[in-house]
Amino acid sequence: MARSINDVIDLTVEELDELIAVASDMKDDPGKYAKICEGKVLSTVFFEPSTRTRLSFESAMYHLGGSVISVPNESSSSASKGESVADTARVISNYADIFVMRNPKEGSSYVAGKAASIPFINAGDGGHNHPTQTLADLMTIKIEKGHFDNLTVGICGDLRYGRTVHSLINALSRYPGVKFILISPEELKIPDYVRREILEVYNIPYEETGDLVAAMPELDILYMTRIQRERFIDPANYDRLKDSYILDMEKLQTAKKDMIIMHPLPRVNEISVKVDEDPRAVYFRQTLYGRYMRQALILKLLTEKDYKEPKPPKMIKSEVLCKNPRCISQTEQELEHIYKLVNEEHQIYRCIYCESKMKMPQTID
Ligand code: CP
């Protein structure tokens, strides 16, 4: 079976360091890589809007000498006629050498990766994971700060639905001395599983606050995020929360001189355009680092020979439906309801697709 990257933790710390090293070499010596993927085809299938992720993947493949075939929206694909994600992945495996997908259904990337017979990369599955944004973030931190350890990282905005936030916390928690200050309205705090299964399990120091101004002087990195309108079921809640944080020059007065300001983009109004001129604003360079990291990842997946899949966790099948209304298992009829054991002591299971928590599902085998 070909390798899938669904989550940033599908890559080891050594692999992340290797990707950053290769991406940096691609930045410094692009000619060396200009034809390295000649004859190879990348397929991008995006069922949610995107500017950076889709175009940077496509640009990445062209910078490696390869070609691209693309489905830029759901309505121009046979998904609009009812074709499943799994069947889409099986078909694309006959046309391309590597497959990238964005889909609003959480866990859709797990399904696509299992069905594809070519390497697969998740470009965002609903509010769940967005691993290649994290690759862009890591290269940005490495180049702009020089290291990952002993940094105080403030993450501000929509920490509940912001998939880039969950992946970034997961990735940075693997480096020593990192501390998080998590800045959000009460309703948009990080999900419980990030707090319990990453921050608390690995003893990562963190604070939760609603006050950006008070947190500012401590920060080495300020990672701003957009309030994710598309994830709100009640639009009134979005309207109430959308302007919770607006970073402007006044709020930056107490920030460290060498703090960097990051944002996965798109920005709505959470960073004033005046901040763009501040040398600490690195969010547009972050989009370029994203292209280099995607180049490095494409090259790795197309050339690696010795990948061995890790041992799977203990899993059970159940008749109990996943309770997450955005889970792919709610809409794809062919999928079995499968849960993985994540905490033996408390018998906590998670949906194999979207990773929503389930307590003691009824087993049928
Ligand atoms: N950061 C990000 O994922 O941007 P797009 O939605 O434009 O791809």
Image (spheres, grey):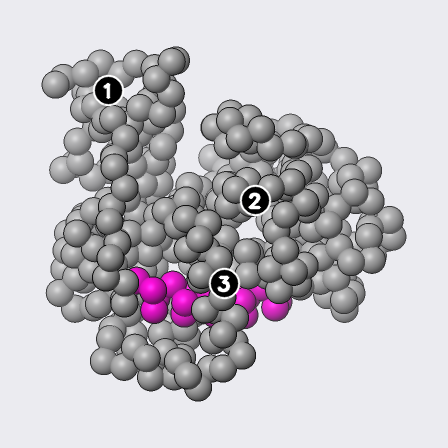
Q: Which mark is residue 320?
A: 1
Residue 103 drawn at (x, y percent)? 34, 50
Does 38 sit left or right of 30 as displayed? left
> Is 140 above or below relative to 229?
below
Tell me which label, 2 or 3, sits earlier in the chain. 3
Question: In this view of the protein, which residue sits in the foreground, 34 or 44?
Answer: 34
Q: Which mark is residue 175?
A: 2
Does 257 sit left or right of 271 as displayed? right
Q: Which mark is residue 20?
A: 3
Q: Residue furthest bottom?
A: 31
Residue 106 drawn at (x, y percent)? 35, 40
Is residue 65 on the magenta stretch?
A: no
Is residue 287 on the magenta stretch?
A: yes
Does 122 sit left or right of 1 as displayed? right
Q: Residue at 21% of width from left, 23% of height from top? A: 316
Q: CA distance from mark 3 to mark 1?
A: 42 Å
Which residue type carries mark 2? Tyr
Tell me which label, 3 or 1, sits earlier in the chain. 3
Q: Residue at 44% of width from left, 62% of height from top? A: 19
Residue range highlighted in magenta: 283-301
Disc 1 crowd, CA 10 A, few/some/many (<14, 14-19, 20+): some
> Is 268 above or below relative to 157?
below
